[in-house]
Amino acid sequence: MRKVLYPGSFDPVTTGHEDIIVRACALFDEVIVGVLYNPHKASGAFSIEERLALLRAVTAPFPNIRVKAFGGLLVDAVRACGADAVIRGLRTMADADVEVQMARLNRQMGQVETLLIPATPAVSHVSATMAREIGRFGGNLTGLVPESIRRQVAETLAKQQ
Ligand code: ADP
């Protein structure tokens, strides 16, 4: 049974993340979507509990996806959930520069392998940072966050101006 961990901040989950999750789901027996957070840092736009709830709503149709929070190092999260590898999404070559360095570091630290999946062109421009900015100014989040959670995300962000 092949298990993979997809880590990120998911603040909030976007259509870009959703694309990677759905594709990973077809490749692995089990996909664990991990909300990684730094216990020493203030939380982002959405609390960890809110991010988990949004991710659970989006991934509900897929029986082989689990959503969990992990505080601390990625290599420890991989060990804790018994994943065989990590997946990360690549939007641009700038992402690739950073991700390849992270992948090497995690392999050195914990023998963790990372698989990099290129974004589908239709969502390669989508980022949680931009979704947060647009949502805080009351902009339209269609296509940026999954439709099933769009209203909830828009309402939370609109209160944060
Ligand atoms: P963001 O960079 O949007 O804040 P995260 O830090 O939660 O997102 O990133 C989690 C993972 O998802 C990373 O591997 C990141 O490269 C990937 N990712 C983010 N947005 C997209 C996208 N639009 N398409 C593909 N992968 C993405």
Image (cartoon, rainbow, N blue to C red):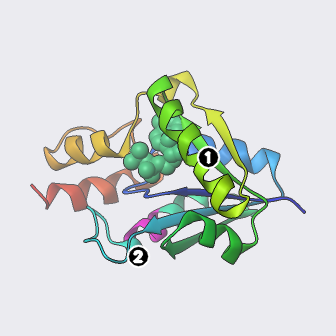
The residue carrying pointer 2 sits among few (fewer than 14), some (14 to 19) or many (20 or more) residues within 10 Å by Cα, namely few
Which residue was labeled with disc 2?
49
- Residue stretch in magenta: 50-54
Q: Quadrant of residue 26?
A: top right
Asked whether mark 1 and ligand 1 are closer than 8 Å, the reply comes as no
Mark 2 or mark 1: name the one nearer the start of the chain. 2
Q: Residues within 10 Å of mark 1 (few under 14, many from 20)?
A: many
The Cα atoms of the two marked residues, 2 and 1, are separated by: 27 Å
Q: Which residue is mark 1?
A: 103
The image quadrant of residue 121 is top right
Q: Secondary structure at mark 1?
A: helix
Q: Residue at x 16, y 44 (%)?
A: 138
Q: Residue furthest right?
A: 1
Which amino acid type is marked by label 1?
Ala
Give how far across and how far down residue 71 sits, in percent. 47, 75
Question: What residue type is disc 2 on?
Answer: Glu
Instruction: Work out whether 24 lies above or below 50.
Output: above
- Magenta-span inclusion, residue 128: no
In the depicted structure, whether residue 129 falls above or below residue 148? above
Q: Is residue 149 left or right of residue 41?
A: right
Let me know if residue 95 appears in the view: yes
Q: Residue at x 21, y 56 (%)?
A: 157
Any part of residue 16 in sight: no
Residue 153 left/right relative to 160: right
Secondary structure character of the magenta stretch overall: helix
Examine the image and state in which quarter residue 41 appears. bottom left
Q: Quadrant of the C terminus?
A: bottom left
Q: Secondary structure at mark 2?
A: helix
